[in-house]
């Protein structure tokens, strides 16, 4: 293979997948590969897949079909599939799409550069799934930008750090525990070392990442002697690092969200006022069938506690409609809880059967048209709620971290502390800075504004830290 080998990665699904794609891109670049601008210019095309929803898995097969003519033109092109579809399907994926050369589960990504270095097309397909043979789950280099790089310092302004892998919860509809394995928490010292190294390179916002961050616990034997949960202690320690402006995390499970974390929203200024707390359904009957281990009343009590600690907190959630056996009354309960909580935004999905999950075998599956009807009602309701909440911000002054360029010329884009996207006129020199923006207009998804202060008090305070 020539010296200028080029790769092209397409990512489907969640932030874990986005993170894994960055991890793979960085590993490939370290091994002499370059990013290609399109699939047709690449020697290695990788689809990093998601199988949480059936639709996402079908999309992957459609992409593989599209790659067949490219492979005909360039027989040395290597096509890889990673992520949850790869773990779930294994060799069966090759039967469905013979374009595939390499099928790699999420825990085996680190092996790809070595495989490519010794590639022998006569031996394909190669299937790697399950746990890696000996490698550590975490690689100290696994730190990649969440947003386009800050073009002044050429370092990632906003980065993810994985603090744990896998999940122990086995929600009835979810494939994650089967495909990403059981929970493994990363040692706190490693996470802090990685955060320090990022901050030294110019990162200003860190998002701690895990399927269920609230059950982070690298040392279960030690917890009795210390106050607060291990995750709360980790947050406080990361927040104390010099140079950090903003700290976020995702994703929380409502059954594990403890008061020590809720209190941090009132006491840690760098912890941004936003939480993503998946609700999934508003009916206790459906929550119980989903195996979520909390009730509507418990969820509402968490929202109360969070808003008491931090009145301006933005709360976002996930909703699944049409779970097997969900009646019209159950669905109305979900609409009612959306009205009562007033989430800032939601991710909503139609239930779909996923292989090996408990829900697969439940009776009373809903017809597709009914699930679509319910989804449209949820989306319409939420659009109105988001529009109203965003309109209420018109005239307010928001601290915005400038991530990059907006869609229009001379326009910049950034996020407020509570994770709302703002577009405003400004010069590229402000990318990577905190600015104060006066909000002048809004829609259900984004805000518009004008900069009123390019070096605000928070930034000055952070610079002194
Ligand atoms: S908490 Fe439930 S939904 Fe979330 S990853 Fe674990 S099993 Fe899946």
Image (cartoon, rainbow, N blue to C red):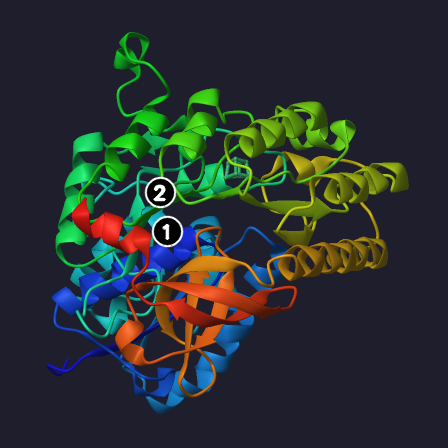
Judging from the image, what secondary structure is the residue with disc 2 in?
loop
Measured from the top left, where is residue 29 in percent x and y?
Answer: 17, 69
Please name the residue shown 23% across and 75% down the image: 151
Whole-number angstrom distance, CA of label 2 to CA of label 1: 7 Å
Q: Quadrant of residue 443?
A: bottom right
Classify residue 102 as left or right of residue 110: right
How many marks are shown on the rendered structure? Answer: 2
Q: Up-down: is 465 above or below 109?
A: above
Q: Which residue is mark 1?
A: 105
User: Ligand 1 within 8 A of label 1's CB?
Assistant: no
Image quadrant occupied by the C terminus: top left
Please name the residue shown 35% across and 28% down the image: 231
Please name the residue shown 37% across and 51% down the image: 105
Tell me which label, 2 or 1, sits earlier in the chain: 1
Measured from the top left, where is residue 428 in percent x and y?
Answer: 30, 79
Measured from the top left, where is residue 364 in percent x and y?
Answer: 83, 39
Measured from the top left, where is residue 452 in percent x and y?
Answer: 41, 68
* Residue farthest along the right direction in this orientation: 328
Tell me the number on the disc at residue 130.
2
Do tag 2 and tag 1 residues touch (Cβ < 8 Å)? yes
Task: Give the camera-side residue of 297 and 425.
Answer: 425
Image quadrant occupied by the N terminus: bottom left
Please name the residue shown 13% across and 83% down the image: 2
Tell me the number on the disc at residue 388.
none
Kindly tell me whether residue 244 is visible in this rendering.
Answer: no
């Amino acid at each position: 293979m020539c010296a200028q080998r080029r790769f092209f990665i397409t990512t489907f699904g969640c932030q874990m997948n986005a993170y894994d794609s960055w991890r793979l891109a960085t590993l490939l670049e370290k091994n002499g590969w370059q990013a290609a601008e399109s699939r047709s210019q690449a020697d290695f095309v990788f689809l990093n897949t998601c199988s949480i929803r059936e639709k996402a898995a079908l999309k992957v097969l459609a992409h593989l079909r599209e790659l067949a003519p490219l492979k005909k033109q360039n027989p040395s092109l290597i096509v890889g599939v990673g992520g949850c579809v790869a773990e779930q399907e294994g060799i069966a994926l090759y039967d469905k799409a013979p374009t595939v050369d390499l099928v790699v589960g999420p825990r085996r990504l680190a092996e790809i550069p070595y495989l490519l270095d010794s590639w022998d097309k006569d031996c394909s397909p190669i299937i790697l799934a399950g746990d890696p043979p000996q490698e550590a789950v975490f690689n100290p280099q696994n730190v990649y930008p969440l947003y386009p790089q800050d073009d002044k310092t050429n370092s990632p302004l906003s980065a993810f750090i994985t603090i744990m892998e896998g999940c122990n919860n086995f929600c009835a509809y979810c494939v994650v525990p089967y495909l990403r394995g059981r929970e493994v928490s990363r040692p706190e010292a490693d996470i802090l070392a990685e955060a320090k190294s990022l901050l030294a390179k110019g990162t200003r916002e860190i998002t701690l990442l895990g399927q269920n961050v609230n059950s982070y616990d690298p040392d279960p034997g030690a917890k009795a002697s210390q106050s607060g949960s291990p995750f709360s202690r980790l947050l406080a320690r990361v927040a104390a690092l010099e140079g950090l402006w903003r700290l976020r995390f995702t994703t929380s499970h409502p059954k594990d969200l403890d008061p020590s974390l809720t209190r941090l929203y009132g006491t840690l200024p760098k912890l941004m006022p936003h939480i993503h707390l998946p609700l999934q359904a508003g009916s206790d009957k459906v929550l119980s069938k989903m195996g979520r281990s909390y009730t509507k009343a418990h969820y509402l009590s968490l929202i109360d506690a969070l808003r008491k600690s931090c009145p301006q907190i933005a709360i976002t959630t996930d909703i699944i409609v049409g779970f097997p056996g969900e009646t019209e009354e159950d669905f109305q309960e979900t609409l009612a809880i959306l009205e009562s909580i007033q989430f800032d935004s939601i991710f909503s999905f139609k239930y779909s059967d996923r292989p090996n999950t408990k829900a697969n075998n439940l009776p009373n599956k809903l017809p597709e048209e009914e699930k679509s009807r319910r989804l449209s009602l949820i989306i319409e309701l939420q659009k109105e709620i988001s529009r109203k909440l965003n309109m209420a911000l018109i005239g307010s002054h928001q601290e915005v971290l400038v991530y990059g360029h907006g869609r229009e010329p001379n326009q910049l884009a950034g996020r407020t502390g509570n994770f709302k996207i703002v577009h405003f006129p400004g010069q590229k020199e402000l990318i990577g800075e905190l600015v104060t923006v006066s909000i002048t207009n809004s829609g259900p998804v984004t805000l518009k504004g004008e900069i009123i202060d390019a070096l605000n008090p928070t930034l000055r305070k952070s610079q002194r830290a």
